[in-house]
Amino acid sequence: LPGTVRVEEEALDTTQDGDDLAAGSVDGSNPTSTLETITGQLSFTGDGAAITSVTFGGTTTALVGGTIEIATDYGVIQVNADGSYVYTLTDPASHAAPPDNTVVLEKISYTVTDSDGDTDTSSLTIEIVDDVPYARDDSNSVGGDIGNTTGGNVVTDAPGADTLGADGATVTSVDGSDLTGGTVTVTGTYGTLVLNADGSYQYTVTSVPSSDAQESFDYTLTDGDGDTSVATLTIDVFAPPPAPEVVNQTLDVDEAALDGIGSASGSDAESTSGAIKLSDVSSDAQAITSVDYTDRSGAAQTAAVVAGGTTVETQYGSLTINPDGTYSYTLEIAADHSGGDVSEAFSFDVSLAGGGSVAGGATLTVGIEDDLPTAEDDANFVDDAGVASGNVLTGDGQLDGGDVLGADQALDGSLGTRVTTVEGQSVAFGGSVSITGLYGTLVINSDGSYTYTVTGSAPAGAEERFTYEITDGDGDTDEAILSIGIPDPDGDIPVALPGTVRVEEEALDTTQDGDDLAAGSVDGSNPTSTLETITGQL
């Protein structure tokens, strides 16, 4: 009776094991399977019937010794007289093109002879199930600078290695473009892919993405008898890191806070601190390595920044800078603002983790706020001799007054803070001016000292007023009034002189201490100062 059995081309392997009659010539896609070999029993009846010959490909071979083994188109079959058989597939079969590619048939005829010589012929059909390739998705990545390349093999690279199958397979097309001469070039959005039949490829970046992007290419794997499989090669194209940017910081210090000479020397506003955020320079910024600055003499200098920090004496103060970008600056001397705003400028080199550095990758500008002189109104009375003496700058010898000279009085090479005009008349440095008033004469010197002398008759309780201007070392000015009272010799008529004083809002604090009459409701920017309270004499 005829019969049909099936073997699997995918089970082909190059090792003879198990029931195999022979080793295969190639490995299929599932070489550990044993389905390349089939055993069975041919069906026949009759007294003493036995198989006596086998026919394949037009050739009939008689059984010798009760068995026969013959080679077929794609394998080997062994048939025994009792009808038992073993078939082993050893070579891939050439199947029809898809979709009619399910099986290829091997047909083996056999003759059965009974005890009295009667014969019959039947057949065994062996279906060889086609092995097919399996293409698996692949991935790769490349930095997005123009000219960067990456490569590999879509067939062999793990983890996306393809299974070629028993019929062998090659890459035949990419994104619908067939390979010509064993290769194809495909232009993507950000680069060009060159892919070869053996699966090897190279991708070259031709356009820089603005952000991380992906390119995808679909390739087709085709085996020896036309079976196909499609997979995707995905390439991550990483946008290049942004070019390093110069990080600029600007801070201010106050000349008025200079200890001993500033107009608000109790303040700590002569100092400032901060940090340069290195990641704002570059994503791989590592450390500040050097600082460019101007020294006290005005010369340009460069200093290395070392672990633990580097301190340099600058044109007007001192800077401490650490490798991590933290810094502090303290103003130490007054700056000459006669030419306008004054600042200190610093430039820092920044090293990169990948090597190299960014010269001037960060800058710091420290603005120096000018300290200004403050002329306060002054008051004095003539004595019994008709004379009043004092000093409008220092307040010495007066009932009220005394100016705030400011930090610029100490400028090197300057004339310091001095009286420069009185009632519109200039006072030369080191000189004096004489002003004739309503009732007397005022002689005032550039250092602020003065003498007022009554020269004529004055009504009881009279008052003289003189407007004067002071100028500091870099040209800042302020003006005030010197009031001279001329009392009634008999003391019958009182004389009250105007006065002006100043307090600082920044000195507010919520504690009552020192000469405070009460605690403040809030803290100012410099609560340790005592300039929220003033004492004096009307």
Image: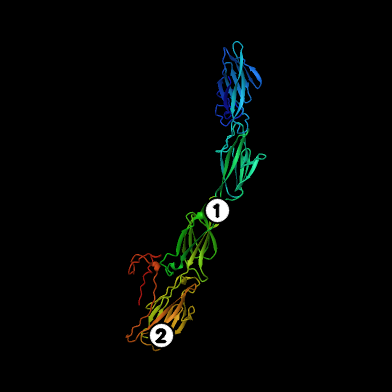
Query: Considering only vertical position in the picture, is 474 above or below 8?
Result: below
- The circle drawn on residue 516 is none
Location of residue 106 (image quadrant): top right
Q: Secondary structure at mark 1?
A: loop
Residues packed near mark 2 inside 10 Å, few (<14), some (14 to 19) or many (20 plus): many
Q: Amino acid at mark 1?
A: Pro
Q: Residue at x 60, y 40 (%)?
A: 219
- The circle drawn on residue 453 is 2
In the drawing, does residue 33 fall left or right of residue 451? right
Residues packed near mark 1 inside 10 Å, few (<14), some (14 to 19) or many (20 plus): few
- The circle drawn on residue 242 is 1
In the rendered view, how is the structure colored? rainbow
- State which quarter of the image contains the C terminus: bottom left
- State which quarter of the image contains the N terminus: top right
Q: Position of residue 348 (x, y in %)?
A: 53, 58
Query: Considering only vertical position in the picture, is 274 above or below 131?
Result: below
